[in-house]
Image (tube, rainbow, N blue to C red):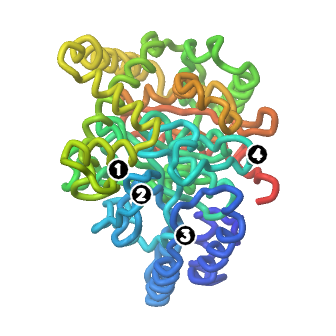
Amino acid sequence: MHQMTLAEIARGLADKKFSSEELTKVLLARITQLDPQLNSFISLTEELAIEQAKAADARRANGESGALLGAPIAHKDLFCTQGIRTSCGSKMLDNFKAPYDATVVAKLAAAGAVTLGKTNMDEFAMGSANESSWYGAVKNPWNLEHVPGGSSGGSAAAVAARLLPAATATDTGGSIRQPAAFTNLTGLKPTYGRVSRWGMIAYASSLDQGGPLARTAEDCAILLQGMAGFDQNDSTSIEEPVPDYSASLGDSLQGLRIGVPKEYFSAGLDPRIAELIQNSIKELQKLGAVIKEISLPNMQHAIPAYYVIAPAEASSNLSRFDGVRFGHRCENPENLIDLYKRSRGEGFGPEVQRRIMVGAYALSAGYYDAYYLKAQKIRRLVKNDFMAAFNEVDIILGPTTPNPAWKLGAKNSDPVAAYLEDVYTITANLAGLPGLSMPAGFVDGLPVGVQLLAPYFQEGRLLNVAHQYQLNTDWHTRTPTGF
């Protein structure tokens, strides 16, 4: 049962080959048995899961249907879930139980999805390795000595290890696509505003976007269908019709114009990954795609711009965690200032403190124009590059990451080295574009991903290309040894 995809589960439930309750119990037992190796879950919600599974079975018995009705999933632990700990991977929120459901959680529950638990993540979604979590690092099921990517590494590791078929995740600078690449999954960051951020604990509000992590593009289409849509509670949500993502999966790629930016193939890219990307290009050419070299000249400025904008927004968003209203509070504060200082000093880990301080500095009087304002101008240039490129091509293709997953602890003493691993992913967040990573092969036994980018609200096109690629390759079917 644990090897089934979301699509296969939907068909099995519809054909009454098994019940949601049976499947849920199998997966909960599997998580209990195998997750101690991975540390991919922060909280298991066994009682809720069984209750939701029974309700889904009853709905099917009454004639209801739906791809997500009775399907087991998990939520990254920054989506608020009513009455359940929502920790954001932090000591600060270790004791926080959300009083309401995030829109994504509520939408998927209404569709009949079964929540198995909350997955581990980098603290407040700040990281590229899932090593900054208060609950300990997550291990990559392909090699337990390596990172699974971050910040959605818990969701990625759990799905890759077949503990469940799919999970929600979030992407601020690549935190869906990079873990997908490191763990041989398909991960999609939708267009900014496509999926509601209401009830999603914020890192950087103009960059954060929720999306699906699964083994196939077909499964991502199913999960995104349940997540997407306008939400009046979210002022950044865009009122745009949600198409049937599964309906366009079978479309032909004949004549599809794929742009390959020359800037992607620089000295920083592992040549073995470059070769796998070229192999992917050849596979898509066989399916009728037309390849064209393009340029994204301002890509080199994206990382410095991102690491000014994101920490600046983080310093503002995280100011609410002060030891007064909710979250961690220090013992016996002497006065209000002492309460603030010690609660935040004890509640935030080193990476979060680093980004708060960088952000506060960038926003401070005398430096705002020099750093934050200039970074926003670069952001516009990055977006303009994409708009010009999409006048010539339909999608853009390249590597998801410059290197395969590194060893646990390898970059802990040099955070900038970890930041540089986001070089190919952060541009989509700066521009607000949809991006997808899909499996493209292996280097030294570790998975490698190829990234696809499309114009705004063209998630269906990305899923179509990935699905057609996966019908003609088998990288996405590989399973890590022992799982």
Q: Which residue is mark 3?
A: 72
Q: Which mark is residue 87?
A: 2
Q: Which mark is residue 380?
A: none
Distance CA(mark 2)–CA(mark 3): 21 Å
Are the residues at dot 3 and dot 1 in contact (C-beta closer than 8 Å)? no
Q: Quadrant of the N terminus?
A: bottom right
Distance CA(mark 4)–CA(mark 1): 32 Å
Q: Which mark is residue 143?
A: 4
Q: Residues within 10 Å of mark 2 (few under 14, many from 20)?
A: many
> Would residue 428 be found to the left or right of residue 230 on screen?
right
Which one is in front in this view, the residue at disc 3 or the one at disc 4?
4
Circle 3: element type: strand
Query: Percent from the top left, x then y, of residue 27?
Result: 64, 72
Q: Which residue is mark 1?
A: 195
Determine the residue positioned at 76% across, 50% down. 478
Q: Is residue 375 visible?
A: yes
Identify whether 256 is placed above or below 75: above
Circle 4: element type: loop
Viewer-proximal residue among 405 and 68: 405
Query: Percent from the top left, x then y, of residue 19?
Result: 59, 83
Which one is in front in this view, the residue at disc 2 or the one at disc 1?
2
Circle 2: element type: loop
Q: Earlier in the sequence, mark 3 or mark 4?
A: 3
Distance CA(mark 3)–CA(mark 1): 20 Å
Q: Quadrant of the C terminus?
A: bottom right
Residue 83 falls in image quadrant? bottom left
> Identity of the amino acid at label 4?
Asn
Are the residues at dot 3 and dot 4 in contact (C-beta closer than 8 Å)? no
Identify whether 251 is placed above or below 482: above
